[in-house]
Amino acid sequence: MDEAYIYDALRTPRGKGKKDGSLNEVAPVKLASQVLKAIEKRNNINTEDVDDVILGCVHPVGEQGADIARTAVLEANWHESVAGVQVDRFCASGLEAINIAAGQIMSGQSDMTIGGGIESMSRVPMGSSGGAWMADPDVAYHTYFVPQGISADLLATKYGYSRTDVDKYAVDSQKRAATAWKEKRFKNSIVSVEDQNKIEILSHDEYMRPETTMQSLASLEPSFSKIGKLQGFNDVAILKYPEIERLEHVHHAGNSSGIVDGSAAVLIGNKEMGKKYNLRPRAKIRSFASIGSEPTIMLTGPAVSAEKALKRAKMDVSDIDLFEMNEAFAAVVLRFMDVLNIDHSKVNVNGGAIAMGHPLGATGAMIMGTILDELEREDLSTGLVTLCVGAGMGTATIIERV
Amino acid sequence: MILKNFKLEVEKTGICILSIDTENSEINTVNTSVINEFEYVVNKLTNDEDIKGVIINSLKKDFHFGYNLKELLKIKDKETLFNIIIKQNKILRTLESSGKKVVSILKGKTFSGGLEIALSSHYRVAADDPETLFAIKDLNFGLCMGMGGSQRLPRLIGINQTIDLIINRKSLTASEALKIKIVNEIVAKNQLMKRAKEIILDDSTFVQPWDDKNNKDSKLKPFDEKNFGFFIGTISKTHSITKNHYPGVKTFMSCLFEGLNSNIDSGTKIESRNFVWLLNHQETKAMIKTLVINKPRKNLLNSSIKELANILRKNYAAEGIRLLLQGVSPAIIENAGKRIGCSEGPLATADTIEIKNIINQLDFSDANVTAFIGLMEQKSRKGKSSGAGFYDYKNTVRIKIWKGLEELVALSKTQPEVFKIETRLLFILVNKFSSEADNYMKNNKIEEQDYFSIKKCNFPAWTGGPYSWIKNYGIEKFIEESNDFAENLGPRFIPSKKILTLVKN
Ligand SMILES: CC(C)(COP(=O)(O)OP(=O)(O)OC[C@H]1O[C@@H](n2cnc3c(N)ncnc32)[C@H](O)[C@@H]1OP(=O)(O)O)[C@@H](O)C(=O)NCCC(=O)NCCS
């Protein structure tokens, strides 16, 4: 098996995913192509050497449809020989893209690949791609479908995370993200988004609320209690989990992942490609794994996928220096840390999606860049990236600096 | 062919009056011989060049029309059944697409298949009469449409309105039906035929919306932005209410989901497949047998039937308290009760009827229950009307299980699986009903008692009543397990003589 090396990782800043968000003006294909161009420029590669560009995207419809990866390759004016494929593993799409890209290198079928992702949630809103999972009555009944927010509240109820627990976690996320930005810890990885005149549109994560406190969060109403009651989702969750009397709705806009726009790309290649372009490998992929888990509670997959990836790498939880566990909802991270018995000081040390937002298809690739930068900054060695995934899945990747 | 169920009159003007009057039945009923005759009649008139249009009329009081369920249930081969349903649907399709203008005149109850037939005509004239009503309430006995209604109705009035009508089992008056285009026109009862003839002879066009190539109505598809949220919300809502029973509800939603992304021909096939599946479902069969086929002709009830309903509620509540004292968590007890189809859990029921009122249903094996009720009284946890019981209340609205319960009872570390508790609750209800029912109703046949258990004693309808439920559960298995329960938990589980005689039959 060949080694798959990470040579670079870049991302756009995250724009607020609403019509008044800065990146709402930018079409998704342009967000994706700008990151590809930046990768090309910074590493001075001849794009003809790139075999495949794999981009995660959760709503591949409308302007994100018709294979946005290949479209972005063409829009970036890369060589026409570069293939492109869009993948969807819901929230872990960006990480899955990296895993597939790495897999191509490891199996010796490609020499250089891109794994990344794109999501403009302000232009192609969540839910746009429909799906039999929730809309085919046979499937929805059979899987006890509830939306992610209800699953997050179910998880919190079942494992006893109170409103205080989840809010405390959210305040930490905001503080950590604020420090990271203040100390310019992301500067190596951010590509400012520009218009066709090279006028800068956005250069920082604009969703953040560093002033957040326990008191300011306390005033927020739970986001999922109304649909949970009115549309029967609470009762469907309880039908699946009869040991629960009633759902406690603890998640709200301040402790759930933010809705944002963004894209990211990670350059992966074999040893020869590094030599050819005189690139220093920043890390190698040790192992990766995806798993399926119970779909109604939906968000318990990360720990299981992490364990599977650890086993493949013949490693133990204690061998990992830093973790990035996507902050889809606060309770998901709390549960992940409890199951694997990991201290919060090793997890999401620069904040996460609660503070900065979660551009669905791109997030996995973004937090890969974040962990890489942080391992280098702290001069640590191993990192594990994982995300919870819709319909009950988890994806994890372990990297090691070289 | 000698017509026994239809009458055909062809007038010189080219108008054909097709009157339905199925033999030996109070309401128009479709069995295989009716379908054969219907096919013959429709082929004949659609091939007759002299006929311009057809008026469909019912010679009975109502325009009601429905499959003969007794006959259909006897058909064991699913493909045979499917072919029968498909044939009926093809007849209606032939009628609406033959190039003849079809007008139906509607009076009395246009229910079930009656409405489905009316929808396959091009124009519907209704009698201006308070007795003119429109509905498809087949979900009441577990069934869903089987003559194309699930495809024509949403294509005519939209998905959301169809869901409202069918899931909520609404009846519409003529003017309500007019408002949402289920009927095209209302006229005085004695003008129906005259008006229908005028319509046939005028030069108005007649193409069904689903056959109109220029019709791009976006109300149609579940995935349209306008419908999507409501559609998935309805799936969830119905799932949460039916709690994995009453499969007709899901089947109806499936007909919409699968059928509306298709055309009318594929759509009616989809509906027919769903219909056959549903008709073969054990719960549907049980409900149809009890609520339709064996519906009692005579009602010999007296007012004490209410007392029987009360006894059942009290015993249901008492069993909840016994389970609690055995260490079962309140959540599992309450959810088990709701999962078998009771409107509230046993402990909530105890609160509603006032906890102490249960005592007269306890027996010698229940000393601990009596003591516990005394303890609850001491703590002023008397029930709903006093605002504190097993639950906390806020202005008589139930909030959540009282925290203090955890100090009064020791809950087991390992909790039983919920279906075991469901079974136990059903056993207590069935045994209690069976040993008491003869004292409270003069109808003493088991089929009659099944019917009244549902209609008068809130017994969950999906079971088809206690006796149907035992039969489906397995009579011998039920008796054996009841005896086990009786040995371990008390004599209340001893099966009645009536149940024991089921084995012999
Ligand atoms: C939770 C969720 C529904 C909230 O959406 P929203 O209500 O549109 O959120 P907003 O950002 O508009 O915030 C709502 C309010 O909370 C306030 N708020 C948000 N974060 C806050 C914070 N940290 N401190 C104080 N107030 C805050 C906002 O000011 C806003 O108030 P306003 O309307 O008065 O301005 C949405 O973020 C969500 O769905 N997140 C999960 C995404 C997801 O499911 N991803 C895929 C699966 S992981």
Image (spheres, helix red, strand yellow):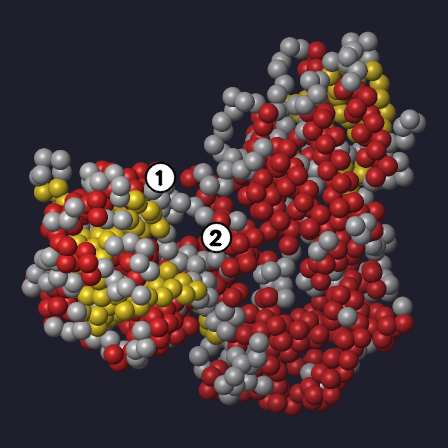
Where in the figure is residue A67, as x and y percent of width and height? 34, 42
Quadrant in the picture for residue B258 = top right
Work out whether disc 1 and disc 2 sit on a shared chain. yes
Q: Is residue B48 visible?
A: yes
Q: Are marks 1 and 2 in contact (CB under 8 Å)?
A: no
Front residue of this view, candidates B481 and A271: A271
Q: Residue at x 85, y 31 (%)?
A: B37
Chain letter of disc 2 in the image: A
Q: Is residue B392 left or right of residue A122?
A: right
Q: How many marks?
A: 2
Chain at numbered mark 1: A
Q: Amino acid at mark 2?
A: Trp
Mark 1 belongs to which amino acid?
Answer: Ala
Residue B24 drawn at (x, y percent): 90, 39
Q: Residue at x 11, y 49 (%)?
A: A44
What label sits on residue A133 in the rendered view? 2
SS state under label 2: helix
Disc on res. A361:
none
Q: Nearer the viewer, residue B389 or B138?
A: B138
Q: Quadrant of the N terminus of chain B?
A: top right
Identify whether A103 is placed above or below B219: below
Kind of element beneath mark 1:
loop
Left/right of residue B23 with respect to residue B481 in the rendered view: right
**Left or right relative to B32: residue B492:** left
Query: In the drawing, what numbered circle is on residue A66?
Result: 1
- Rate crowding at label 1 as few (under 14), some (14 to 19) or many (20 or more) other CA atoms within 10 Å: few
Residue at x 14% of width, y 58% of height: A275
Quarter of the image holding residue B257? top right
Please give left or right for residue A280 compared with residue B120 in the image.
left
